[in-house]
Amino acid sequence: MLNLLRMDFYRVFRNKGFYVCLGILIFSNILLFGLLYMLADPSARQFLLEIGGVIKGDFSDLDTFVSNTTILEIYHQGTVGAGFFAVITGVLAALFVCTDFDSGFIKNIIAAHENKWDYILSKCVCLCTVNLLYLVINFGVMLVLNMAFKGFFKPSKPADILFYMLCAWLLISAFSMLTMLICVITRRFAAGVAWAICINSGLVTVILNTGLAIFGLGWITDNTIYMNLFNLPQVFNGTYVLRPVITAIAFFVISVILSKLVLAKKDI
Amino acid sequence: MNTQYAVKTNNLSKLYGTKAAVSHLNMEVKPGEIYGFIGRNGSGKSTTLKMCCGLVHPTEGEISLFGCPVTDETTRRRVGMLIEDPGLYPHMNARDNMILKAKCLGLTDFRSIDHILELMNLSDTGKKKTGQFSMGMKQRLGIAMALLGNPDLLILDEPINGLDPEGIREVRECLLTLNEEAGKTIIISSHILGELSKLATCYGIIKEGELIQQISRKKLEAKCRDYIQLKVDNTDRTAALLAENFPDLHFEAADRNQLHVYDFADPAPLTTLLVTNGIQVHSCSLHQMDLEQYFLELMEGGRRYA
């Protein structure tokens, strides 16, 4: 497995897609931070109005919002909680896994590695590492921006950050594993990317939730990865919220096991 | 460990639904051989080779590589393969693809990569992405990747597809060198039978999933030997006359009215002799057969030659 992991790391860091996806996420976070700053900072708001901008609403709300909002909450509201982060990492996972099948390189891999766990676990570790890097780098960018703007948003406590990062990492990695499963089953770029967009963005979950709520079964979707990511608490208050962790681990483990079974069952 | 055979399959079968892609195939490839695997499109060549590489699970039967089951990972490392298309990441260059394969095999010394790229005339491709490679370049890189890890057995499915005549010659010379100097066993399938006949020391002919014949090059050459085909009214009298007048002549009766005369270039003395002795000669022709004709006749005749 370690040989394949070395191969996957070499490949992922030489892949333009890795840097493009990272760039998109960083750009989105900078854009979000910039917009919030423009709206919330009085001098920036004034500048916006002077150059012809139109702002509707009560400014005092914004001031209260800024003074009560932590940088972690901004990070969550921006790319992570809305599912954009998961869509980007899902698309990257789909491209990463499907390229093996599409290019035929999988033949080289499977011919040398009879144990299919080698392949699945290597992809699993590689994608989880990418997700962690993305989360940390993007949050780092937010912290740097906040510092550059003299702590515009309230800083978060290290315990809150660690708790949030762990939960978000597990949930986003669970999404990646689900995408990997779809790619192993279908072996098609289009299917993997479509899955990443429709599922990871919460589109399907929201539709399902609406439908199930009619019958009073809306609670079912509370156990989905998306809902847990959407409702992920940004404050660690000592009482563990285990639902996101358990949901993430359950989806993660099931997806990995199914991926292995499918890969072992299907011919190359 | 039984290493009498580099590859040995025992009743190997692969069913897709109810259709047998490969049926009870018993292939035997000895170490050091170049095994030419011949068959029509869809006859089961690629499926067989994929099973030998562990890419496809057999429905029935066994495969052993150097005396070990194909599932043995250590033995699998002794196999280099190029099946159908060379599996290359299109957005990477040739060297990166080689490095990835080397890492996949667990190699840490990448010096052999440059040597192999040079061997396959790909050392000057630089940063060019393999997606922009010509078909021939891709095939050569596929062979180069199969050579990584210094495998004892090379399984090459249509390796000269898309190569120009010069490329074909280079690949042929390279494979011959690998076989003769490094003692590598090679299984090669190709539709270019003329080219295959310049390489193979043994042939396996597959038809509709069944291996209808395995034959050594020597035996095939003997079968494909040129001969004069005589159609006469009486083969017994003809044979007696030939034996009397040409004691060193090698001939055999193909049927009641047909004789095959070997190693005799000029048919004129034969016909003169027969006619002057009152034998009716219906036809006299020179029969020449190469691997292609042999293969085509075998495909039409099924097990006739088996």
Image: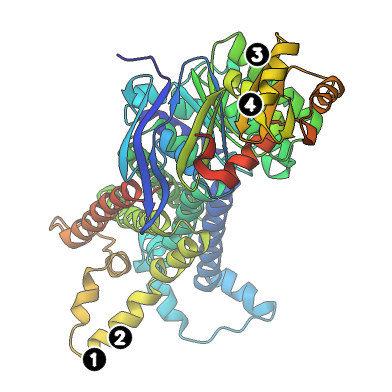
Residue at left 68%, top 44%?
B131
Q: Residue at x 14, y 57 (%)?
A: A240
The label on residue A210 is: 2
**Colouring rule applied to residues:** rainbow
Q: Are marks 2 and 1 in contact (CB under 8 Å)?
A: yes
Q: Chain of mark 4?
A: B
| Circle on res. A214 | 1
In the drawing, does residue A71 fall left or right of residue A219? Answer: right
* C-alpha gap between disc 2 and disc 4: 95 Å
Amino acid type assigned to the residue bearing label 2 in the image: Thr
In front: mark 2 or mark 4? Answer: 4
User: What is the crowding at mark 2: few (fewer than 14 residues within 10 Å), some, or many (at least 20)?
Assistant: some
| Viewer-nearest residue: B42 or A179 | B42
The residue identified by callout 4 is: B236
Secondary element at tag 2 = helix
Q: Chain of mark 1?
A: A
Subunit under mark 3: B
Q: Quadrant of residue B96?
A: top right
Q: Look at label 1 and name its amino acid.
A: Ile
Query: Which numbered disc, 4 or 3, marks the residue that appears first in the sequence?
Result: 3
To which residue does mark 3 refer?
B177
Camera-side mark, 4 or 3: 4
Identify which residue, A189 or B127, lies in the foreground.
A189
Q: What is the distance, in whole Å, between disc 2 and disc 3 at their CAs?
A: 69 Å
What is the x, y in percent for residue B27? 43, 30
Query: A154 above or below B114?
Result: below
Q: Are marks 2 and 4 in contact (CB under 8 Å)?
A: no
